[in-house]
Image (tube, rainbow, N blue to C red):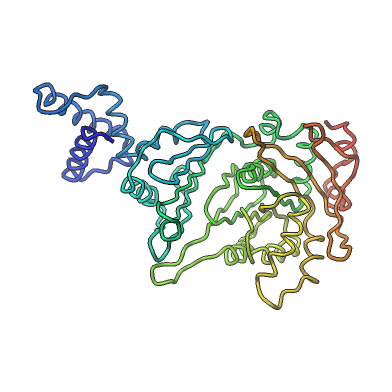
Amino acid sequence: MSSALSLITDQVRERVRLDGVDLGSDRELAGRYVRDAVERYSERALGGSLPMLADEDLAARQIVATITGFGVLQPHFDDPEVEEIWINGPERVFIARRGVPELTDIQLTGTEVRDLVERMLQSSGRRVDLSSPFVDASLADGSRLHVVIPDVTQKYWAVNIRKFTARIRDLNRLVALGSLTRQSAEFLRMCVLAGQNILVSGATQSGKTTLLNALLSVARPAERIVTVEETFELDLAARDTVAMQCRQPSLEGTGEITLRRLIKEALRMRPDRLVVGEVREAEALDLLIALNSGLPGMCSIHANGARDALSKLATLPLLAGRNIDSSFVVPTVAGVVDIVVHCELERSGRRRITEIVAPSGVVTGTVIEASTIFRLEHHVLAATGSYPAKTAGFTAGGFDLAAVLSGAGG
């Protein structure tokens, strides 16, 4: 920020302090304060005591963004095509536009990066300091913030903002974007309505959360859905929804609320469907126990493929303690997971579903047997001709798998 803009910004902040107002919640008032300060500055500049502003309107917009938004990053927050923003260092600010990363020309200082992070954390109640060098938080618009500071990082604060986007809210939109075919979308819709337990797998930024949102959009309106996440990312339009997120420990080391605790609490809330944003550790055991009680559910997991996702889900519960044995976990995963949907992010930035797999419930040795229902062939997600082995839910719901998987429903 130039010396002129810094001077005007300081003057606006001093007026705010004296007037005792909150510009963060009133952008119109902020604009008025800034315009007044810019006009006063320009009058003084005409007298030759200060350098002239090249563009008063641009200067006013930048100062409003600094005071009420996120400064030089605000234009990227406002750009609907930008999906992610990350800072590797004050002069290394990147964005991802339609899945493709690019280095911006933004130049910050270390102090400006810290000020931005503190402003982002203001409404979350979370903190980052030497005693807690990592933080995950949700911004006011639903975007997800992750920060790591030295000495965990080598020199600079590492900041990642995964923007919230409400553009993709249903399976039809994914079909229009080419992530799914109409036939596979209809099959997944049928799976949701039949109460199938669905595991969504993929790498970071492959579209797992977007797919979970789209799948849940076709759930019956009367369903009560309870979601648990580390930080809020899911955005459901369902009428009867309860969303919960984890809580970091206090400065005294107390008050932490983990995913394991949230899953247990969710079961006391009369859910018709339980959704875990992502399983990473021992909470996988609590999820399996919940699904094994007959409660329909969904979750996401990082994995290289659909079958790898099953193997990982059968491994994570072992982190819960020595008394947890794979002889219980593997058959449970085989029995409770009905559908695995794998997502991928292509080099071009396009997100696609590349595989839909249905575990049979049978375990051979330590391998969970599964049929591939849809597979990406010649850049098209095509039905393989296989059918899910577990058909009780479809039959009970009156759904005709053959009508969809034979192509008649496509």
In the image as oriented, which residue stretches furthest toward the bottom? 323
Residue 185 appears at what percent x and percent y?
Answer: 75, 37
Residue 21 appears at what percent x and percent y?
Answer: 23, 43
In the image as oriented, which residue stretches furthest toward the front? 154
Left or right of 208? Residue 189 is right
Q: Which quadrant of the view contains residue 31?
A: top left
Residue 326 appears at what percent x and percent y?
Answer: 77, 70
Question: Which residue is more in the foreground, 373 or 395?
Answer: 373
Left or right of 333? Residue 130 is left
Residue under the image location 35 percent in, 41 percent down: 108
Residue under the image location 24 percent in, 33 percent down: 5
Left or right of 397? Residue 316 is left
Left or right of 149? Residue 257 is right
Question: Which residue is more in the foreground, 346 or 249?
Answer: 346
- All told, the count of numbered labels is 0
Residue 232 appears at what percent x and percent y?
Answer: 53, 51
Question: Which residue is more in the foreground, 278 or 409?
Answer: 278
Residue under the image location 16 percent in, 24 percent down: 42
Q: Which quarter of the rendering shows the C terminus?
A: top right
Q: Which quarter of the rendering shows the N terminus?
A: top left
Above or below 310: residue 356:
above
